Image (cartoon, coloured by chain):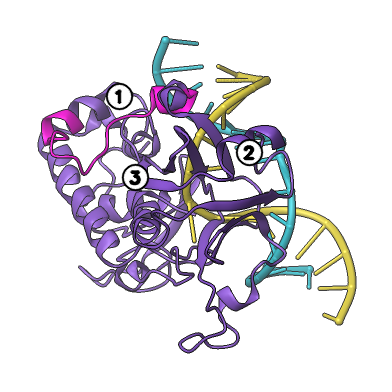
Chain colours: A purple, B cyan, C yellow
Amino acid sequence: MPELPEVETVRRGLQRLIIGKIVKSVSHDTEKSFPNSPSAVSEFIVGSSILKVHRRAKVLLLELSSNYVLMVHLKMTGQIVFVGDDRFGAGHPNDSLINNLPDKSTRVVITFTDGSTLYFNDQRKFGWMKLLPKELVNEEPFMQKVGPEPLEPEFTATVFVARIRRRKGTSIKAALLDQTVLAGVGNIYADESLWGAKIHPATIVKKLDNSQLEELYKELKFVLELAIEKGGSTDKNYVNAEGKKGSYIDFARVFRREGLACPRCSTIIEKSRVAGRGTHTCPVCQMNNEEA
DNA sequence: CACTTGACCTGTCCGC
DNA sequence: TGCGGACAGGTCAAGT
């Protein structure tokens, strides 16, 4: 799945649903989904309780009473779904996702002593869960190099502009997607914020002036905050911690809207490839300042 | 060094 | 309907 808003939505759901629960068992399918040894799992997860759920970039961090942290990266198609012990009770249609778990994409199952369960599903198997001592979390290679959180107050327009300019020779879209520049932006919100700022994704960073980057900063924060409010974007796989879809996609202005009218000028939205990714643009609003 | 491309996987959709 | 190929929201290793 997901980008910052989706992971943040899952974090909030878990924070509400699993705090204080005690882990009864953990089972997993492959080393890849969960590389920790069975002995580490039984020693540092089983029997411990969930103290708090954090997020850094697109990584979820479940803080355990054992002083270990369970890191989770959902990559493209991962889901973390909590199911109470009342899954067949009122309020759940028979065909809802949670009634059918585990399914073919289930990689890890964590059960709690109260009868509830947490499923880690991942169709494409890119995602992972990793158990680390709390003090080693920030030593992880990804955690070491990942850039600042865009929604933290200290992430000002000045900081954004300076960090984007570290990638002056590449396209603005590649710079936004670079997790070492700033954390949490992926393909959806890169396209959406660039449309908002009327910048073509292929524009080379050094061709952009400060006022354009400041506009992009505002648009980026706007789309990230709106997306969190909408519970993220569900294109295909993404669901929140309760197995429910997000609705940002209904508000998207360009993402997955190729062939439809630009909401600003009614020109037909185009799809192309920038930074190796499917890219959605309005050819009129986002006139390229001097092609890539 | 800065930047780009392919690989990791499975599923789906599109054109022939 | 069947089949090959392209493509899908992320990140890393290898390539230019």
Q: Position of residue A133 (x, y in %)?
A: 49, 27
Q: Give the residue drawn at x 27%, y 32%.
A: A148
N-term mark: 2 or 1: 2
Rate crowding at label 3 as few (under 14), some (14 to 19) or many (20 or more) other CA atoms within 10 Å.
many
Query: Residue tagged by mark 3?
Result: A201
Q: CA distance from mark 2 to mark 1?
A: 44 Å
Task: Look at the numbered disc 1 and give the secondary structure of its residue.
Answer: loop
Span highlighted in magenta in the image: A140-160
Residue B7 spot, x, y in % from top left? 71, 35
Residue that numbered label 1 is attached to? A168
- The residue lying at 17 percent from left, 35 percent from top is A155
Amino acid type indicated by mark 2:
Val
A228, A256: nearer the viewer? A228
Label 3, label 2: how far apart the Cα atoms are: 44 Å
- Whether residue A156 is in magenta: the answer is yes
**Callout 1: chain:** A
Residue under label 2? A41
In the picture, residue A269 is in which quadrant? bottom left
Q: Is residue A213 above or below residue A196?
A: above
Q: Residue at coordinates 24% horizontally, 26% vertically from top-left? A: A163
The residue under label 1 is which amino acid type?
Lys
